[in-house]
Amino acid sequence: MKLNQSKIILILIGALLIGLLGGYGGVKLAQNQGDSSPLEITDTETSDNEGEGTDADLPVDLNKISQTFDLIKSNYIEDVDDNELVEGAIEGMLSTLEDPHTSYLDSEMMQQFNEQIESSFEGIGAEVSEVDGYITIISPMKDSPAEKAGLRPNDQVLSVDGESVEGLNVNEAVAKIRGEKGTDVVLEIQRSGVSDPFEVTIQRDTIPVETVYSEINSENGKDTGVIQITNFSEHTNEEFTEQLADLEDQGIDGLVIDVRGNPGGLLDVAEDILKQFVPKDMPYLQIEDSDGNTEEFASDLEEEKDYPISVLIDEGSASASEIVAVAMKELGYDIVGETSFGKGTVQQAIPLGDDSSIKMTTYKWLSPNGVWIDGDGVEPTVEQKQDDYYYSIPIQVTDDEPLTFDHTSEAVANMQVMLSGLGYDTGRTDGYFNEETESAVEDFQEDNDLEVTGEVDEETGGLIETQIIEKIRSGEDDEQLERSLEELYQ
């Protein structure tokens, strides 16, 4: 049967509404089953029965969309693809929600989403979101090109390869940032506390989704297991459970769970991890729906672990990381580090039946005591910052305009902090390039077989930056971890 364009758009919108309702039905079914999380991604199928897509089944105002579709197709001077118009209508509806976490995922974006939680993908390895209207780095992933380039949580992305991202949604910005392994992308970054933006060139790579790392720290007669979770992906709980069992078999005296820089992921995975620590007499999580109804979720665990535990967080810990941190905090364990990001909502990817989906905010999550941390984050019980050089930015210099003696600037202060972090005495870190700073630069150049000029040009600045990033990644001066170990056995 041949349908007119008006009928086509109404059926497509009807399919969208059916897809949303189908997703909600799947959620309710999961809740009734008891053992499953109500927040798992659910698969639904949309109806393609033309007889159900009648005008009478849809709100009256949707006729405006149909009329607009017809007007564009009949009168607009350029040819327009039907699918682009439909996707534009969907994106327009979602944009009115003013929720940076709700978005339309076309088939390509949905494939990228699935790759990120299942196996591996190509890109720079950073979680990106929209914060206060800006495309913002939530956290670079461990050992990723983004981390190696020195990107930090809360860095704002102003442009990609010279093109502004203003007005783009998160998915559109991510599409520009991602790309094939081996290719470069140039990001213009604005960092809090720094006056001028700076550029970072990052070579894309394959980002494996390996999410759990563990080791034993032996200090002061105590063997402490340290487990870092970098993301809550499909196999994270399996990796975590296996590595925790291995640490316990080795007879650890205590445990540190490190979720610093962890942007979140699948909520049911965070739940599975909490079920290993939070006993059944206390919920590990509460969920609130759009009507304000709350439901508590508890484990079958009889008792807590018989060793002390602490959790490490920072400003890059978000979403599922915060679910773990706040539950452990309210259970009475120490949380060490800096206040976390503050994301207290849950999204579901709801399929529309054509390989596309809507990622929609459907719930609030609350702490075991009913606290909603959205916008506020989880505050540590033991606040601890890192050394100043952890918060430095890339050195922006050219050979034509190096940093030299008697100059004063933020760039000089940043360089002084870096050199001091590498063990060179600059005498001051306030941004004035004094004689001691010049001497420190000369010592660095001599130690690294560079021409000894006392000036910081591109080569010297680049090497200072490379060495400070390597030092950060080595964890050599990890004051937050050291503080966590100190507090664990108090």
Image (cartoon, rainbow, N blue to C red):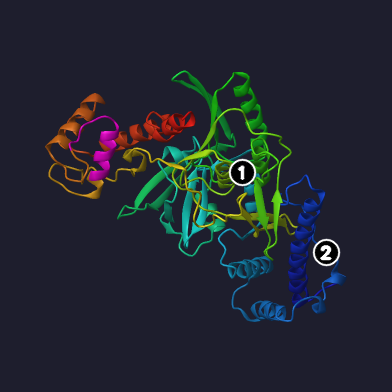
Q: Indicate the position of residue 434 as horizontal and vertical percent values.
A: 13, 40
Instruction: Verify CB contact (< 8 Å) between mark 2 and mark 1.
Output: no
Res 228 visible: yes
- Front-most of 172 and 490? 490
Q: Indicate the position of residue 121 as horizontal and vertical percent values.
A: 59, 41
Magenta range is 413-427
Label 1: few (<14), some (14–19) or many (≥20) C-alpha neighbours in 10 Å = many
In the rendered view, does 456 fall on the left or right side of 170? left
Q: Indicate the position of residue 38 as horizontal and vertical percent values.
A: 73, 51
**Residue placed under numbered mark 2 in the picture:** 48
Q: Indicate the position of residue 41 as horizontal and vertical percent values.
A: 71, 50
Which three-letter amino acid code belongs to the residue tagged 2?
Answer: Asp
Circle 2 or circle 1, nearest the eye: 1
Res 458 visible: no
**Residue placed under numbered mark 1 in the picture:** 116
* Mark found first going from the N terminus, 2 or 1: 2
Numbered disc 2: secondary structure: loop
Label 2: few (<14), some (14–19) or many (≥20) C-alpha neighbours in 10 Å = few
Name which quarter of the figure residue 382 lies in.
top left
Residue 425 is one of the magenta-drawn residues:
yes
Which three-letter amino acid code belongs to the residue tagged 1?
Answer: Gln
Q: CA distance from mark 2 to mark 1?
A: 30 Å
- Front-most of 165 and 368? 368
- Label of residue 24 in the image: none
The residue that appears at 42% across and 45% down in the rendered structure is 152
Name which quarter of the figure residue 105 lies in.
bottom right
